[in-house]
Image (cartoon, helix red, strand yellow):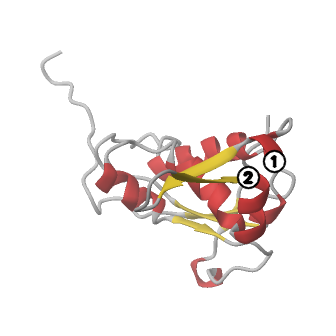
Amino acid sequence: MAGTKSYLAKPGELTPEWFLVDATDKVVGRLASDIAMVLMGKHKPTYTPHVDTGDFVIVVNCDKVHFSGKKWEQKEYAWVTGYTGQRTQTAGTVLERHPDRILRDAVRRMLPKNDSLARKMLSKLKIYAGPDHEHQAQQPQPKEMGVK
């Protein structure tokens, strides 16, 4: 047992891949959990908890995601301004104004709670409301996510 050592990835040692995900008719939570796993790098055998070993994820058609039940009317997103009280919006309102925020917030809350590491991982997530994206040069591979 004296000769066995665990592998720990070092920053910049691995080259990230690019994946393309179509969010049409996908449930937000299931899709977000799969995306978070790829951003953290847990789908690779070289996963190291304190290093960003994840891949890039491009999500298209984020305006066509679904919630189960009555969450479009009942789920509320709250934030604090500098004034007294909180501001809230329903999920339906957020989808109309900023369609990418619903999926981005869901993924952000599933990433590690270390702010600097989570920020690096979240910067690898590219979300677009329509079917077009500007990352053709990276040759993203299509990947099915958010399926039962």
Left or right relative to 122: residue 70: right
Who is closer to the viewer here, 55 or 71? 71
Q: Which mark is residue 60?
A: none
Looking at the rendering, which quadrant does residue 24 occupy? bottom right
Q: Which mark is residue 91?
A: 2
Name which residue lies at 26% across and 42% down: 8
Who is closer to the viewer here, 3 or 91? 91
Left or right relative to 132: residue 55: left
Name which residue lies at 48% across and 41% down: 42
- Is residue 57 visible in this depiction of the protein? yes
Task: Determine the secondary structure under disc 1.
Answer: helix
Residue 13 locus on image (x, y percent)? 30, 60
Q: Residues within 10 Å of mark 2 (few under 14, many from 20)?
A: some
Q: Residue furthest left?
A: 2
The C terminus appears in which quarter of the rendering? Answer: top right
Q: Residue furthest top?
A: 1
- Which amino acid is tagged 1? Trp
Residue 146 locus on image (x, y percent)? 74, 44
Which residue corresponds to mark 1?
72
Name which residue lies at 61% across and 80% down: 135
- Which amino acid is tagged 2? Ala
Q: Are marks 2 and 1 in contact (CB under 8 Å)?
A: yes
Who is closer to the viewer here, 38 or 112? 112
Residue 89 locus on image (x, y percent)? 68, 55
Name which residue lies at 30% across and 56% down: 116
Q: Residue furthest front?
A: 84
- Is residue 59 visible in this depiction of the protein? no
Q: CA distance from mark 2 to mark 1?
A: 5 Å
